[in-house]
């Protein structure tokens, strides 16, 4: 089935009713995000005036956009490798199309169904079991987050005896590195527990016929284990792509810092320790990629290593994010009719996940 045919087939489900409670929550989260951003801007007003008073090297901005777009493509390829395990017919063209569209949904459409569910709904339309479709998204997310901690752990190993760029001891860095190592170890143990089906063995809900959220989660984890534990080569490839993509992101972050503060002496190595932890905060479910929160955390973390302003560097990084988001927006608009139907399917899938039971776990006959 072609990409267009699959997208068009998603136009059948009726549009679900919107929840007024959900709308209020989304508006509240948006206000919170902009409130946090306003607080950070106020805390860094002197630095902002300093930056706008000088001419910026836009070549660094262009390089940052290219590097960040490359990291996004690596993310799409990671998901492509994972999906090919369960559906060899899945094409690279579909991967890129859904990757761009999913990125827009995750980044710039607050309150909309998540980009991951858009991609999962597409897989379901390819007659892939819903648990397998969701499992591919879950393991992709796990590898994405684990890659951040692996990258920071490697940087931490080199930075154990770190001093700040001024030559003074870096307070709190040892505790931070230990926390990173513990987080990376926890991520590895989580994958080992999933592949060893420990959740299936020890959670009582997994022994029920499949009703309820906990039972559904356990079922998805079991499906993930069954699908991927015999293809650990693909899992390790996904982790390697995750680390490589995050390394590119950190380098792009560093370039934004150099563009805003040419006199910056915070090293690239220090960025590889603090950058992943700052970017990890974007996993917090606040609109526009945890707007405001990441800036505040980045300011605190990079302050440990003498950065002029981690908050403004994070804002510069967001310019890269939204610049690349324009590409996804163009892909989205070019496929608007089909994506609307796919969005309805994603809402149905989300509703089933909230209810704790998929109504059609087995694949339908191919058309």
Image (spheres, rainbow, N blue to C red):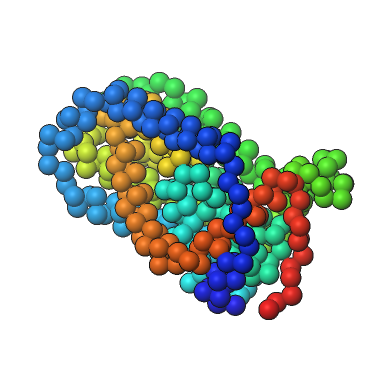
Q: Residue at x 38, y 32 (%)?
A: 34
Position of 84 compared to 223: left or right?
Answer: left
Expressed as whole percent of the image width and height from the top left, the position of residue 92 reads: 50, 71
Q: Is residue 214 visible?
A: yes
Residue nearest the observer in this picture, 356 or 23: 23
Query: Could you tell me which quadrant the C terminus lies in?
Result: bottom right
Task: Please identify the quarter of the rendering in which residue 273 is found.
Answer: top left
Q: Is residue 76 visible?
A: no
Q: Residue at x 70, y 51 (%)?
A: 352
Residue nearest the observer in this picture, 184 or 60: 60
For the image, the number of numbered tags is 0
Q: Residue at x 23, y 50 (%)?
A: 60
Expressed as whole percent of the image width and height from the top left, the position of residue 108 reads: 42, 48
Expressed as whole percent of the image width and height from the top left, the position of residue 234 reads: 60, 62
Residue nearest the observer in this picture, 185 or 106: 106
Expressed as whole percent of the image width and height from the top left, the position of residue 302 reads: 35, 30
Position of 55 compared to 140: left or right?
Answer: left
Task: Please identify the quarter of the rendering in which residue 169 is found.
Answer: top left
Q: Residue at x 50, y 25 (%)?
A: 175
Query: Could you tell me which quadrant the N terminus lies in?
Result: bottom right
Q: Is residue 161 shown above or below 223?
A: above
């Amino acid at each position: 089935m072609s990409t267009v045919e699959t997208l068009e087939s998603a136009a059948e489900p009726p549009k679900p009713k919107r929840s007024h409670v959900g709308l209020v929550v989304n508006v509240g989260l948006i206000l919170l995000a902009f409130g946090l951003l306003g607080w950070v801007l106020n805390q860094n007003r002197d630095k902002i005036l300093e930056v706008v008073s000088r001419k910026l090297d836009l070549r660094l901005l262009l390089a940052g956009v290219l590097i960040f777009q490359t990291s996004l493509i690596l993310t799409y390829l990671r998901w492509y490798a994972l999906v090919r395990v369960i559906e060899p017919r899945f094409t690279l063209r579909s991967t890129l199309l859904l990757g761009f569209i999913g990125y827009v949904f995750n980044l710039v459409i607050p309150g909309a169904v998540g980009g991951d569910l858009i991609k999962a709904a597409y897989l379901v339309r390819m007659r892939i079991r819903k648990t397998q479709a969701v499992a591919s998204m879950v393991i992709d997310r796990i590898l994405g987050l684990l890659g951040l901690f692996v990258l920071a752990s490697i940087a931490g190993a080199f930075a154990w005896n770190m001093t700040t760029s001024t030559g003074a001891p870096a307070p709190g860095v040892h505790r931070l590195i230990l926390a990173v190592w513990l987080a990376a170890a926890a991520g590895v143990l989580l994958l080992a527990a999933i592949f060893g089906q420990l959740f299936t063995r020890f959670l009582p809900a997994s022994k029920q016929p499949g009703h309820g959220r906990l039972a559904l989660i356990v079922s998805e984890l079991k499906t993930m284990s069954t699908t991927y534990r015999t293809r650990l080569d693909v899992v390790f490839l996904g982790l390697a792509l995750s680390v490589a993509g995050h390394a590119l992101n950190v380098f792009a972050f560093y370039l934004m810092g150099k563009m805003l503060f040419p006199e910056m002496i915070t090293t690239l190595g220090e960025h590889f320790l603090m950058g992943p932890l700052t970017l990890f905060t974007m996993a917090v479910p606040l609109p526009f990629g945890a707007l405001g929160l990441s800036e505040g955390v980045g300011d605190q973390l990079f302050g440990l290593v003498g950065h002029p302003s981690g908050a403004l560097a994070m804002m510069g990084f967001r310019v890269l994010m939204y610049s690349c988001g324009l590409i996804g927006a163009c892909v989205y608009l070019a496929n608007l009719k089909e994506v609307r139907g796919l969005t309805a399917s994603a809402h149905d899938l989300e509703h089933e996940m909230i209810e704790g039971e998929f109504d059609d776990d087995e694949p339908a006959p191919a058309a």
